[in-house]
Image: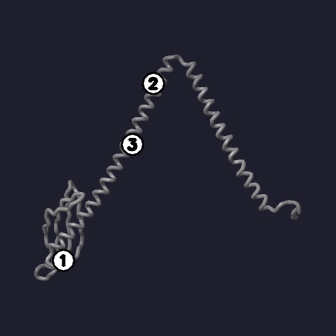
Amino acid sequence: MTANADSPPWWIKLILAALVALALFPVYRAVDGYLDQRAAKKAAVAEFWRREHLPPEQRIAEDKAKEESARRAKAEADESARLADLQARKATAMAKSAAIAERGRAACLTWWRQALNDPDSAKIEEADGAFNDGIYYGWISGRAKNGFGAYIMATWDCQLRVSDDAILPISLTQRRAH
């Protein structure tokens, strides 16, 4: 195959074709938009004439049905908004509760260590708890040296009153030694 000397290279033809396509795209969109508007106007005129030929009782019934449908749609939208607001408040409350529970856990561990004979010997096996009605109920399972220097394994229960700005201890009791 031989190339014509007057013909531009293939890549220039490709670039020109892309430029023509880019130039014609807004024209296509304008024509498409015009056709959509025309179809909408045509449908509106057809609906007008359809309603003109209806008896008054049927027109009134259609109007009532449209009003009822709009009322239902508004009620559903209001209910959806209410549920979304409720879910957002619940998520915020759960995040706040989790943060308060974490503060309560840290406070219980600090209080527990301070109550031990040898705080440096403390080894935590598990520590958990829950926040309910302003009180953090926690438990700590671990081991520490007793007054005689021997390690004991035990579980302690901790109760704290937790608010946004203060943590007040209620009780720290040793449940059992293992």
In contact (CB < 8 Å): disc 3 and disc 2 = no
Q: Residues within 10 Å of mark 1 (few under 14, many from 20)?
A: some
Pointer 1 residue: 119
Q: Residues within 10 Å of mark 2 (few under 14, many from 20)?
A: few
Looking at the picture, how far across and down is residue 129, in whole percent? 23, 62
Q: Is residue 94 left or right of residue 44?
A: left
Q: Which secondary structure, mark 1? A: helix
Q: Which secondary structure, mark 3? A: helix
86 above or below 106?
above
Looking at the picture, how far across and down is residue 118, in whole percent? 16, 79
Q: Please identify the quarter of the rendering in which residue 159 is found.
A: bottom left
Looking at the picture, how far across and down is residue 36, in whole percent? 63, 37
Using the numbered discs, state the Cα–Cα distance from disc 1 to disc 3 in whole angstroms: 53 Å
Q: Quadrant of the N terminus?
A: bottom right
Pointer 2 residue: 64
Identify the residue at image location x=11%, y=80%.
147
Q: Which amino acid, mark 2?
A: Lys
Q: Which amino acid, mark 1?
A: Pro
Using the numbered discs, state the Cα–Cα distance from disc 2 to disc 1 in whole angstroms: 77 Å
Q: Which secondary structure, mark 2? A: helix
Pointer 3 residue: 81
- Along the polypeptide, which appears first: circle 1 or circle 3? 3
Q: Is residue 49 left or right of residue 78?
A: right
Q: Quadrant of the C terminus?
A: bottom left
- Along the polypeptide, which appears first: circle 3 or circle 2? 2
Of tags 3 and 2, which is closer to the observer?
3
